[in-house]
Image: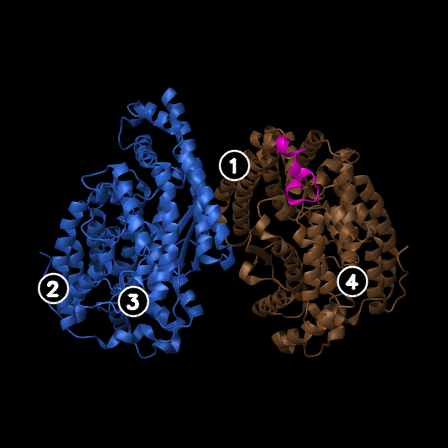
Chain colours: A brown, B blue
């Protein structure tokens, strides 16, 4: 009885903190979508106030007492029970938050706020020097953070663990090395085949209002529930869950690039389907939360790439695209359109990279941020190291810092250890999709009819409904029958791009 | 020195509470504009959490201590100084909030939340019976609230004082009686003149996208700053200030009623100009707040009616309207359009009432709510009393409850004592506008050129910048040179509607 009461109080406290966090989520969404420019300063004060109150609630000593009472009680005897999972994960959050001294948290908030403003200015001036001193401070503070957290074998693990619980830097380094070894010959073969004639099909005039109609139609088709969500436009697209019944995706439209809008929407819809698939009865507790950034990204990349850049999807969607954009596509057929959405071309900018070269961008960042954190690379040497890595890996040298090491906001915002989750998402997605096909058979016929329900139902069952019940590695292994592995991803590339480019791509080693 | 420190702490605490309230304001705005339907339940939890935290901050015992230290100190010696005003008004808020037992506050929140849902349902079914039991509870709780507050001579004063500090029920009853005596013969004369031929000009096909263009153009013209604000659509238009630099107005568009959109926008813009005219340096303190609902309404009604329904305004705006709506207005000229926007016609619904009959709707509600609160009228008798009042005052009997006593949400939301501020706003507006003309001369030429800057500058100087420095009655008397008076309003009606309807309207008694 005592444990039941303690558990009820713990869940109430967890819900209160989550409700405050959800207020911040709405304010953050508004800041990126509708807030008037002059509202920024006050929005900063609002966000800081809510963050402070949230921190107070989430680190309340009473939570530590309750966790102590519950650990070892009957409620945690079955480690997969709802109560055991919630206690385990709330302990993880509580320890992480209470190990960080308040002064460090506040200093990080202050410095990364400055860092993000300087990042905007540095990009404008194409001058990394504007950001450099603050970025040095940020990496020093992140080293302090890692020292307080003491997770894994090296400081990087402490940071990585926040985004991908249980992941470790050394293991990722080996995995990513093997992935790169597999990617390099694939890229070389594809580029050897020459640039296809379809390469400019997406860069015609696509009116934004029609793009919105088309985008909403495909979002509905794949299962995004607009009664429980919205789509708005923003500069840097994202998906945010405000609460049960309120999941918001954003996109941007470029009237000269259909890919930006369509694949941006499919990507964010993938995130949104995960959020909409979490159990609303568990909202406010770990059982109702997404398990990791890597698994979240697996959902967005699965719908964006494995569904949205597949031939079957365009059997369904291309006739609709021709109707919506009529004369713009009069000289194109579904096969050519499918080739156009799968153009492979080494480039300088990660967020616009194709499916084949994308992970090379991530691996460059992963290696640089590990070296920066370990002190093997100095922030003053970052630009040179970045440019050299691009020249060596992708054969391109950035013409300026804005197209080089200033292109992503992450480090200036203190997000160190975040990049690898993008590649984990790609690898998880390939494993999940393979398993879905193995379980349910070839989905091409259904996809070509616009029927994506079997895939969504499978993902709901294997991934979404579990919240944080299993750590991410275990969730993926349970869902797919195999541990994390780079080969399914490479094999999928070989299967798809070999025929598309008329080249022989060796199966993954 | 001690007092300086205490004052600084008081202002910090006031700012923290205001920041939390501003988060609620954004969540409320979102609820009425963009929130997906299924997000309503969680939104209720978010609002309750923020309200609870705000109440905790605003009633913190330390505030009482600080106020005690400051009252009688040098900082309050000059009663018009910023510090004295803030101490006086924070005392007023603190006493009001701490006099109400938490149980009563929570019970009112709970019951009025149910009341508003039942109100929607009762309107749908056109059956007051659905709401009646809860409305009885609400009036009983409001009596308890008044008994705790103990302001003025009778329970109604305690409630009224929240919305219009210093206003008293008995004085309003006398004022409103005189106003009604003046209005009745004006209405009779106008109706005797017959319905003008222009009466349907606003009820043509006005495409919503063009209405938005036109509405934004006039909002900019009168001075609304879109860098520091927004315009969105909603079911029940309102204006909300999120913080300095972020003031949001809302409207609704009816493709068959241009008046709904245009005058709705001018009305909310009037509110917005007040909010945008408050001193941002005082945000979070009484010196940075609007002084009362009545004064707020004076700003919206001044821009909506005294500017927006004036002939000079349409000298400027009608050519633009003809351009935006081209062929729709091909057979109309500015004079006829001006007559159309000043159609007088007794009606059943307050929010659509014309400028002449509007206050009669308010007076009916004022008398009914006073009688309900005093126990002279039972909630079970409300519908009958409402219908009789409409028949007697406006010559119309509601065909059902939805068009009768269920048309306003206020009582079901616990807003008792709120209605009279609408009429106070109309009276203040007439006094302010007269004084502006006396000070600055006839503005018709400037208005006809689309130059509204002199009026806005005058209002900024006389009203907006003062925040809560003066109680509303004193603010109006200082701004206009005269105490609150119904005669300027009646005189303005006589000056305008006499020529418009070709009747002789007696000057106000």
Q: Note whether B413 is above or below B83 in the view shown.
A: below
Identify the residue position indicated by label 3 in the image. Answer: B315
- Checking the image for residue B185, the label placed there is 2
- State the image coordinates of residue A298 (x, y, percent, origin top left): 72, 54
Q: Is residue A426 above or below residue A214?
A: above
Residue identified by numbered label 4: A439
Whether callout 1 and callout 4 share a subunit is answered: yes
Cα distance in 3D space between marks 1 and 4: 46 Å
* Left or right relative to A95: residue B21: left
Q: Which residue is mark 1?
A: A53
Disc 2 packing (10 Å; few <14; some 14–19; many ≥20): few
Q: CA distance from mark 2 to mark 3?
A: 30 Å
**Image quadrant of residue A429?**
bottom right
Q: Do the numbered discs 2 and 1 sit on residues whose CB atoms are within 8 Å?
A: no
Q: Nearer the viewer, residue A159 or A60?
A: A60
Q: CA distance from mark 3 to mark 4?
A: 73 Å
Could you tell me which chain the residue with mark 3 belongs to?
Answer: B
């Amino acid at each position: 009885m005592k444990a039941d009461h303690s558990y009820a109080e713990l869940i109430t406290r967890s819900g209160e903190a989550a409700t405050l966090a959800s207020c911040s989520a709405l304010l953050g969404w508004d800041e990126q979508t509708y807030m008037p420019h002059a509202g920024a300063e006050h929005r900063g004060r609002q966000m800081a106030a809510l963050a402070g109150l949230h921190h107070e609630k989430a680190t309340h000593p009473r939570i530590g007492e309750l966790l102590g009472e519950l650990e070892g009680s009957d409620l945690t005897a079955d480690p997969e029970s709802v109560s055991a999972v919630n206690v385990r994960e709330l302990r993880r959050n509580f320890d992480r938050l209470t190990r960080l001294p308040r002064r460090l948290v506040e200093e990080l908030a202050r410095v990364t706020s400055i860092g993000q403003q300087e990042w905007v200015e540095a990009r404008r001036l194409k001058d990394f020097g504007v950001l450099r001193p603050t970025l040095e401070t940020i990496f020093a503070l992140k080293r302090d953070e890692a020292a307080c957290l003491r997770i894994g074998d090296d400081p990087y693990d402490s940071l990585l663990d926040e985004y991908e619980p249980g992941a470790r830097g050394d293991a990722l380094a080996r995995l990513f090395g093997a992935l790169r070894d597999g990617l390099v010959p694939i890229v070389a073969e594809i580029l050897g085949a020459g640039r296809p004639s379809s390469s400019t099909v997406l860069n015609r005039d696509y009116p934004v209002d029609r793009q919105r109609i088309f985008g909403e139609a495909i979002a509905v088709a794949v299962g995004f529930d607009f009664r429980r969500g919205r789509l708005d436009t923003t500069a840097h697209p994202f998906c945010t869950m405000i609460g049960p019944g309120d999941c918001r995706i954003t996109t941007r439209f470029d009237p000269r690039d259909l890919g930006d809008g369509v694949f941006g929407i499919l990507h964010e819809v993938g995130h949104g389907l995960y959020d909409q698939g979490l159990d609303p009865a568990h909202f406010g507790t770990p059982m109702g939360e997404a398990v990791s950034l890597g698994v979240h990204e697996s959902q967005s990349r699965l719908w964006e790439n494995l569904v949205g850049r597949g031939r079957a999807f365009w059997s369904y969607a291309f006739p609709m695209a021709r109707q919506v954009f009529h004369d713009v596509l009069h000289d194109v057929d579904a096969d050519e359109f499918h080739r156009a959405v799968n153009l492979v071309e080494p480039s300088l900018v990660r967020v616009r990279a194709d499916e084949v070269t994308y992970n090379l961008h991530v691996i460059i960042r992963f290696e640089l941020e590990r070296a920066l954190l370990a002190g093997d690379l100095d922030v003053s040497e970052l630009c040179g190291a970045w440019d050299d890595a691009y020249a060596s890996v992708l054969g391109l040298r950035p013409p300026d810092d804005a197209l080089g090491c200033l292109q992503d906001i992450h480090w200036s915002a203190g997000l160190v250890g975040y990049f690898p989750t993008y590649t984990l998402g790609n690898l998880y997605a390939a494993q999940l999709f393979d398993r879905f096909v193995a379980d349910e058979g070839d989905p091409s016929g259904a996809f070509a009819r616009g029927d994506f329900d079997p895939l969504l139902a499978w993902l709901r069952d294997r991934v979404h409904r579990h919240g944080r019940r299993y750590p991410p590695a275990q969730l993926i292994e349970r869902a797919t029958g195999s541990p994390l592995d780079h080969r399914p991803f490479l094999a999928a590339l070989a299967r798809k791009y070999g025929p598309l480019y008329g080249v022989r791509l060796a199966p993954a080693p």
